[in-house]
Amino acid sequence: MAAMTDILENKFIDWFFRAQAIGLAGASAAAGTGPANLYFALYTVAPTDSSAGTEVTGGSYARQGVVSALANWAGTQSAGSTAASSGTSGTTSNNNLITFPSPSANWGTIVAWGICDSVSGGSLLFYTLQTPNKTVNNGDPAPTIAISAAQVQVDN
């Protein structure tokens, strides 16, 4: 199986997460940029590559959108970077705190989070286990994903 080069990893991350043109020779201008927004979701049953898991519902829960932009997703060279990707890690992460609504009912135990392509429904694109798990109850502070904690790695 072939692996992605650092060049392709950087171009993909900047295109998909950071709203930059793909910039590949022969790429159609119609290719444009990746999604305008990505949406963070919380899960009480972890998704897998072939199953959707169980997303939190009710109690003021809502997916949280992050605009695809250089300012919101780090370049591959370092956490917090807002320059075009130039690193070799194939990794990006959130440059800002992601804050969910304060729960108005028990949400259960959060065991995973994911990145989706829509504010509701749509497709789960990336997911990871939440370590440690976090129980969220009515009246708890709004759950957050810390700056640089939502790391996504392509290939490598």
Image (spheres, rainbow, N blue to C red):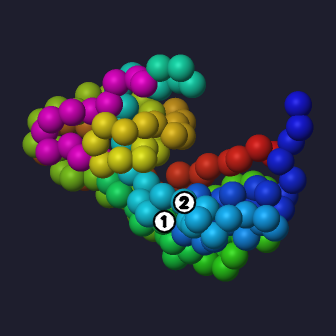
List the residue tagged with mark 2.
34
Q: Is residue 103 left or right of residue 34?
A: left
Residue in front for this viewpoint, 119 or 144: 119
Residue in front for this viewpoint, 67 or 133: 67
Q: Is residue 56 left or right of residue 88?
A: left
Q: Give coordinates of residue 99: x percent, y percent.
A: 32, 57
Residue drawn at x 51%, y 71% is: 69
Magenta span of residues: 52-63
Q: For mark 2, does the 10 Å Cα neighbourhood hold few (<14), some (14 to 19), or many (20 or more) residues?
A: some
Quadrant location, the N terminus: top right
Point out which mark residue 68 bears: 1
Residue 144 showing in the rendered view = no
Confirm whether the magenta stretch covers residue 146.
no
Q: CA distance from mark 2 to mark 1?
A: 8 Å
Residue 69 showing in the rendered view = yes
Q: Does 103 sit above or below residue 90?
A: above
Mark 2 or mark 1, whichever is nearer to me: 2
- Count the numbered circles shown: 2
